[in-house]
Image (cartoon, coloured by chain):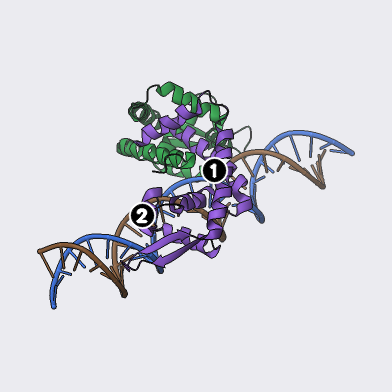
Chain colours: A purple, B green, C blue, D brown
Amino acid sequence: MMSDRLGYLLKHVLALLTDEQAKALAPYGLNGRDLAVLSAVVAGEPLSQLEVASRLRVDRTSIGDLLDSLEERGLVERRRSPEDRRRNVVVLTAKGESTFEEAERVRLQVEREFLASLPDADRFREDLQLLLGE
Amino acid sequence: MMSDRLGYLLKHVLALLTDEQAKALAPYGLNGRDLAVLSAVVAGEPLSQLEVASRLRVDRTSIGDLLDSLEERGLVERRRSPEDRRRNVVVLTAKGESTFEEAERVRLQVEREFLASLPDADRFREDLQLLLGE
DNA sequence: CATAATCGTCAGCATAACTGATGATCAGCG
DNA sequence: CGCTGATCATCAGTTATGCTGACGATTATG
């Protein structure tokens, strides 16, 4: 087919993964994007919205909607930072933490199964990290 | 960073490649998508629009716009098939062929450089093909 | 105190994937 | 032949995402 074109391969591999993640995460009302946001917030110093966005490499103007949706479902809270009142500090609720833990297990399982056909899944992951320069 | 999440890695690796391809192909007025369409049409039996779409795994309703844009630039032509007048057969013009050949060389070079940091670029490609089941 | 920078938000634009409907055409079958 | 259903291309509309540029509020700089 078109399987010699790198863009084609990456695009459709990503689409496959996105589909499978979406199916598996549907019971939690999450998709892969939502879950990534939760994972950015889950531990350590509470982050401002901009910091969350830059961790996820998501555009600054998109993170607001993403957080709105998670906040409506009671998974995260935004609080004005007392030290710098321009910043909205994002924290997980208790419900957010438990949802994250369950959904994160599911995500790991999905990724394992997704990569199961490869001779060396870790090496594939390392290749991707190399390409991103991380 | 978020580099343990497969979706994150694939998404941003794809974004990087798309950017670099777009830059390199800009002199030809093409992007990676356009070039893939040309490559589907370049040789062999002339294809209907639906056949082009399915080769590229592009939605049937998107391929029309894609071809409009290529046709405006004089790179492809659509002809009603005489045997089956429902079908629009897509063929490259002479200009389309020469543009394709030049741009395709550029694309190959971009891909080579893009994968240059990997210990084994071919193996990476094979991994992607495996994941797609091709 | 005055200016510049930062944070979050908003409106708007562009691309892409997709659904469902339509008209034209063709294939199969009685 | 004529009817029915399928196929092809197209169209309108929806959704999701990424981005630009502007804004008010707030903080940092000097």
Label 1: how many residues lie within 10 Å, few (<14), some (14-19) or many (20+)?
some
Q: Is residue A12 left or right of residue B27?
A: right
Q: Is residue A105 above or below residue B106?
A: below
Point 57% across, 48% down: residue:
A103
- Tag 2 and tag 1, C-beta contact below 8 Å: no
Occupied quadrant, residue C4: bottom left
Decide which of C7, B101 is in the foreground and name it.
C7
Say if residue B42 shows up in the picture.
no
* Residue visible at 35% across and 26% down in the picture: B112
Q: Which residue is mark 1?
A: A18
Residue corresponding to mark 2: A51
Give the spatial CA distance, label 2 vs label 1: 24 Å
Report whether mark 2 lies on the same chain as mark 1: yes
The residue closer to the viewer here, B83 or D29, is D29
What secondary structure is found at the residue carrying circle 1? Answer: helix
Amino acid marked by disc 2: Glu
Tell me where residue B98 appears, x and y as whole percent. 36, 28
